[in-house]
Image (cartoon, grey):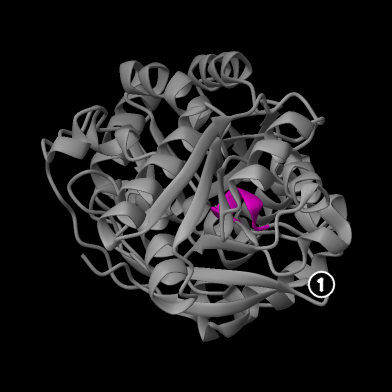
Amino acid sequence: MRHRSLLIITTAAVAAGSLTLSACGSRGEDSGKSGGEKTVTIGLDAPLTGDLSALGQGIKNSAELAVKTANKEKTVEGVKFKLDPQDDAAQPSAGQQNANKFVADDKVVGAVGPLNSNVGQSMQKVFDKAKMVEVSPANTAPELTQGTAWRSGKKERPFETYFRICTTDAIQGPYAAQYMYNEKKLKKVFVIDDKKTYGKGLAGTFKTEFEDLGGKVVGTDHVDPKEKDFTAVANKVAKAKPDFVYYGGEYPAGAPLADQSKQAGLKGPVVGGDALFSAEYIKLAKKNSEGDIASSVGAPLETLDSAKEFVKNYKAEGYKLPYEAYGGYAYDSTWAIIQAVKAVAEDNDGKLPEDMNETREKVVEAMQGVKFDGVSGKVGFDKYGDTTNKQLSLYEVKKGEHKPVKTGTFQD
């Protein structure tokens, strides 16, 4: 695969201006050209309805903001971008259908998403067969980029078309384990997961690291995330008397599990991954969310100079829902596709190839060399398609809000 180095884009170029573009948002024209410009579409797949819609809507809004910025700044001369958001409702079958829809549309150059790792698995083959790039702001399951044997050290990239902006559970779980054991000095844990790709994998990496450190796992169990009554599991937790619970799963089940476990007698916090890092978790668990801890990818956006323009412009757009945990990563995922498109055009006498199949293939090649200063920090990809930004953060619920308590990188 040919690698191409790109000029590093400054923060001002990534997220400049107070955006007031009502006329050049994500809808655009349906025709291939508009006023001498060629219109290309970026697909977006996320849960826009259902229990995880707060995260999905933040992803959609942030991707839309990137498209608006690119059109306003004329980032790619002669190209106008359009966003096509599709709802997967956090269901792998719906994600696969959306992937097929994007591939069948000869104006779609690439796709952003999805949120869920199991949905990502259902989409990868579709995009790979079509040689279309996919950039996820939120998938964290290691096997998506490093293959099913990654735990044994045999890493093999399964799909050349798949990239992600966020770091993986291979370091997210252990990072939390180190914090709880070394800094919180809590030695006994009850581990629960939802048996899904993300939750099971995250809980597994946490458990391995915690035990390696000398911690004791006093119990394990699984829950059905479609349920909301976890009384039986909560009673098991209370009986085992752990210092805390680690939950591998998402906030719609994690919050009631935390609430019910504490009602049953759990004295310590519930700890989990980035899928618990949402204001919705606090709304659902209410006062029993206090003290709970969630890890998340990257550094807190509010602490990054590179994110200031994004935060300002997101607010200026008047979006009804916040950008949530993955907004900055969705912006950067979209911007990465835009930069890859720009590289292809510059390498083709300033215009994209007429054949969309050729354009898609060249965008995949260009993506491997994309580098820029993004909202979430420095954006770039390693040989597996994983982000080169390995930062992580931990947040604790204090007085009804997630407050950052630690930012750094996992130490082997």
- 302 lies above or below 77: below
x and y percentages locating residue 57 in the rendered image: 75, 46
- 256 lies above or below 11: above
Quadrant where the image shows the C terminus: bottom left
Q: Is residue 398 magenta?
A: no
x and y percentages locating residue 31 in the rendered image: 65, 28
Residue range of the region highlighted in magenta in the rendering: 271-277
x and y percentages locating residue 212 in the rendered image: 26, 55
Quadrant where the image shows the N terminus: top left
Q: Residue at x 58, y 74 (%)?
A: 301
Q: Nearer the viewer, residue 15 or 200?
A: 200
How many dots with numbers? 1
- 358 lies above or below 252: above
Left-right relation of 242 to 409? right
Q: Is residue 155 visible?
A: no
Q: Name the residue beneath numbered marker 1.
A: 316
Q: Residue at x 54, y 53 (%)?
A: 273
What type is the residue that disc 1 sits on? Ala
Q: Residue at x 73, y 52 (%)?
A: 24
x and y percentages locating residue 214 in the rendered image: 30, 60
Q: Secondary structure at mark 1?
A: helix
Q: Is residue 287 visible?
A: yes
Q: Residue at x 31, y 33 (%)?
A: 143
Q: Residues within 10 Å of mark 1 (few under 14, many from 20)?
A: few
Q: Nearer the viewer, residue 234 or 331?
A: 234
For residue 114, what is the image quadrant? top right
Left-right relation of 80 to 408? right
